[in-house]
Amino acid sequence: MSLGSSSAVQEALKNLTGTLDENVTNGNGFHGPTTPSTTSFSIALFSTSPGNSSELPFFYQYHHTASTLQNSTNGVQKFNANSVYRIGTLTQVFTVWAFLIEAGDSYWYNSVTRYVPELAQAARALNAQQNPIEYEDWDDVTVGDLASHMAGMGRDYGVTDLSNRNFPFASYGFPPLNSTNKVPSVPERLCS
């Protein structure tokens, strides 16, 4: 029997859908308040079992589009299985967990410049030690600092979206972007 056709799984998915519907309708749930008017999200579940190949790619999907985006002239107006999200906060948590499981914390206190020496070169070229407000001194930033958001960088460091950069993405195998696929531009320097 495939995972998606299991009665126990179907009942759990029905409960999940009801809980999600309640959260986006009321802006409040078991875990506290939510902001459905400004938060969009997608959840998709799939099985890695070869016996469930008929359900590929997903046996469950739930998509919510923030009401503030539904009349937007930039980007998407309705999220679905083909929507592309910027990788962010939740993804970082799973990345850190996977890193800790695989490598432990032995790398935690190493400077990031040990692994990305170009950052050290950039810090020296920008004289980061003399101007720590404007530039990051990467020699002082550890892997653990980055993982715990304690590196001292403003939250909008390098804030403009890559889709707005003048870079030949298509020549590297990425699909071409038209204006509806791009994130609206934001000012280069924002307060954090």
Image: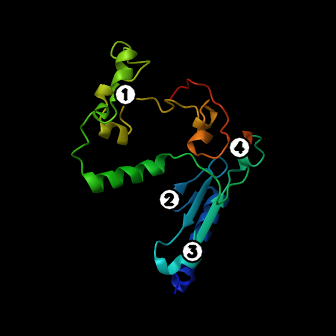
- Above or below 134: residue 13: below
Question: What mark, if any, has residue 75 been given in the picture?
Answer: 4
Q: Earlier in the sequence, mark 4 or mark 1?
A: 4
Q: Residue 70's spot in the image, x, y percent? A: 75, 49
- Residue linked to disc 3: 13
SS type, badge 1: helix
Type of residue at label 3? Answer: Leu
Mark 2, secondary structure of its residue: loop
In the image, which disc is placed on residue 118?
A: 1
Res. 40 in view:
yes
Task: Return the disc, 2 or 4, that comes first in the chain's sequence.
Answer: 2
Q: Earlier in the sequence, mark 2 or mark 1?
A: 2
Q: Is residue 98 left or right of residue 38?
A: left
Q: Residue at x 56, y 45 (%)?
A: 86
Q: Marks 3 and 4, how far apart in space?
A: 30 Å
> Which-is-in-front pick, marks 2 and 4?
4
Question: Disc 1 or 3, which lies upstream in sequence?
Answer: 3
